[in-house]
Image (tube, helix red, strand yellow):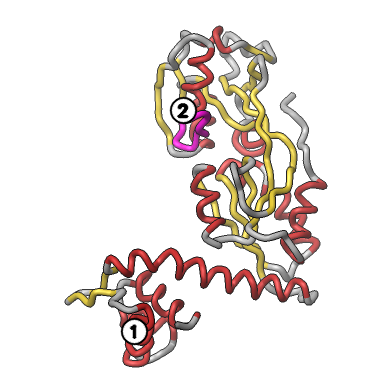
Amino acid sequence: MSLRQMEYFLTVVEEASFTRAAELLHVTQPALSHQIKALERSVGGELLERMPRGVRLTPMGRAFLPHAERAVRSAEQAHRAARAAAGAEGGELHVAALHSVAVGILPDVFALWRAAHPRVALHLHEYATSQALEDEVERGTADLAVGPAPVDWPGTVVPLGEEELVLVVPFDDRFAGRTTVTLPELADRVWIRCAMEPVVHGERFLDWACGRAGFTPRTAVYTEHTSTAVRMAAAGVGVSVAPSHIVRGAVGEDCVLLTPDPAWKRPLTAFARVPPSGAAEAFVTLLRDHWPHPGPA
């Protein structure tokens, strides 16, 4: 079993076609088929079922797939790490982040990085939830991740600071002249809920927080993205919860931010499967140097 065979296997799976995979890999279709057959012999069974129109994974193939992905991505990471350790100025850095972090924090950091390291290309991978972020980084999708502190992470975790969650209301809201509000004061309001809402103690965050305050939140709109929820709240559809950095830095010019009393905060970290080195280490240092960000006015 070779790394090249696993790369060929993954390409066939992604394209669902030997013909298209051979074109992408710049090999002949018989050569590709030969390598896949050799891989199947080494694992002891068929990984792909040849169909009249394309291919699909066998049960053995489905079991093999995530391990092949991890092996290929680990090899790519090893190559990037070796180049970085050797002082290579070129290359690339793969960074994974929650969508809210990518929108609210990383643009300024990426701009600073590009000015300092113009020959190192950045690849950003965005995820909706912390669990998806952790799963993909564990599989080797990125060199490092930026997000809430992972639970029981087996690799390296570098604290960056705290992320503050705030309440978003329009300028004409009855609480717009205040800076803080208690959650029970919002018991009669409707909320904009987001699919990216974090989970706390097995519950979606707002359900957990409002439950502790003695009421169940009433939902006006469900959205896919945090930025959409903020825009809905600014328009007066309902109250939304969002990290302060995404509202202040990206989509919150025409709304008011209220700090819950008591405040909602969670630690943000950079984490990776192995200790960051070279470009990854430099990126983490840049993140730490530009953290914490000022709170909302």
Q: Which amino acid type corresponds to the residue marked 1 in the rendered image?
A: Arg
Give the total of numbered labels.
Answer: 2
The magenta stretch is 193-201
Q: Give the image location of residue 211, x and y in percent.
A: 48, 15
Please state, as top left, top right, bottom left or bottom right, where the N terminus lies in the image: bottom left
Question: Was residue 197 drawn as part of the magenta stretch in this picture?
Answer: yes
Q: Which residue is mark 1?
A: 41
Residue 243 drawn at (x, y percent)? 62, 32
Q: Residue at x 61, y 48 (%)?
A: 153
- Residue 50, x across and y down, in percent: 22, 77
Query: x, y percentage for residue 195?
Result: 44, 36
The kind of secondary structure element at disc 2 is strand
Looking at the rendered structure, the kind of residue marked 2 is Glu
Q: Is residue 47 magenta?
A: no
Q: Nearer the viewer, residue 82 or 111?
A: 82
| Residue that mark 2 sits on | 203
Say above or below: 197 vs 188. below
Q: Is residue 277 at least partly visible in the picture? A: yes
Dot 1 surroundings within 10 Å: few (below 14), some, or many (20 or more)? few
Vertical arrangement, residue 54 with respect to residue 185, above or below: below
Residue 62 lies in quadrant: bottom left
